Image (cartoon, rainbow, N blue to C red):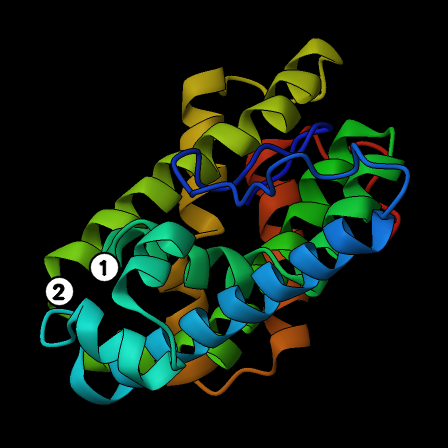
Amino acid sequence: MYASNVTPDPFRHLLQITISNMGRSSKRPYRSEARTAAAEETRGKVLEAGRSLFSRKGIDATTIAEIARRAGVSEATVYATVKSKSGLIEALMKDALFGPRYHAALEQVRQESDPVTRIALSAGVARAIYEGESAGLSLLMKASAFSPQLRKSQEAFEALRREMQLERIDALFEARRSRPGLTREAAATLLWMFTGREVYHKLVHESRWLPQEYEAWLQRTLVEALTDGKGAHKR
């Protein structure tokens, strides 16, 4: 899955927390730092409260009032922090899926110039995302498997995931390193499909593959399916 040289915000509609006049006063800079720290602490409490309640009760059965009580803040603060339950779901997904593992894998892609190797490194990006999801969202997703709100956020994520992969596909075709007879559209679809959640789930969770086995298999599969195979990837 997933990367371009410029990392877009994984959810375009996620509320951006702003602090009024932050950094404008040279006399008392500690005020803006304290406000930023307080906002981050509040955000953490709201997200943790939402994660806990969504995992136990499910998304649809949880109210903003319950999230506020558990976080120890007002309902207005919850709305100001995440805007809505959908905003809270997106924030939880962003933190879990696009966390440190993801950024480390993405940095490898950024530093690589060979288009075939960059396709292979998509396996590491996919692994990072789904390991983050498993660690941070597995209980929530089980409890809310049929939630329309969760499904809507997942659909937005899938659309973004495909979009973020297009730069690697374009680079592969511009370098004339794609598999003969393969169109750009077909290549984009294959990359999106092979790096999808369902493949990871079936191999790692259902078939008990180790994550590194999944990543190695996916690297080989992507190179064979999408590239000319010349000058095989180095990793």
Q: Residue at x 36, y 43 (%)?
A: 158
Q: CA distance from mark 2 to mark 1?
A: 5 Å
Q: Which mark is residue 150?
A: 1
From the viewer's perspective, is residue 112 above or below residue 153? above
Residue type at mark 1: give it. Answer: Leu
Depth check: give the residue in front, 111 or 207.
111
- Note whether residue 183 is visible: no
Q: Which quadrant does the N terminus fall into?
A: top right
Do the CB atoms of the residues marked 2 and 1 lie less than 8 Å apart?
yes
Depth check: give the residue in front, 189 or 76.
76
Residue 200 percent across, percent down from the top left: 45, 67
Residue 225 percent across, percent down from the top left: 55, 39
- In this rendering, would 49 be left or right of 119? left
Q: Which mark is residue 147?
A: 2
Q: Residue at x 33, y 74 (%)?
A: 50
Q: Residue at x 74, y 49 (%)?
A: 32
Q: Which quadrant does the C terminus fall into?
A: bottom right
Where disc 1 sits, the SS reads helix
Res 95 quadrant in image: bottom right
Depth check: give the residue in front, 193 or 78.
78
- In this rendering, would 78 be left or right of 120? left
Residue type at mark 2: give it. Answer: Ser
Q: Residue at x 47, y 28 (%)?
A: 163
From the viewer's perspective, is residue 149 above or below residue 233? below
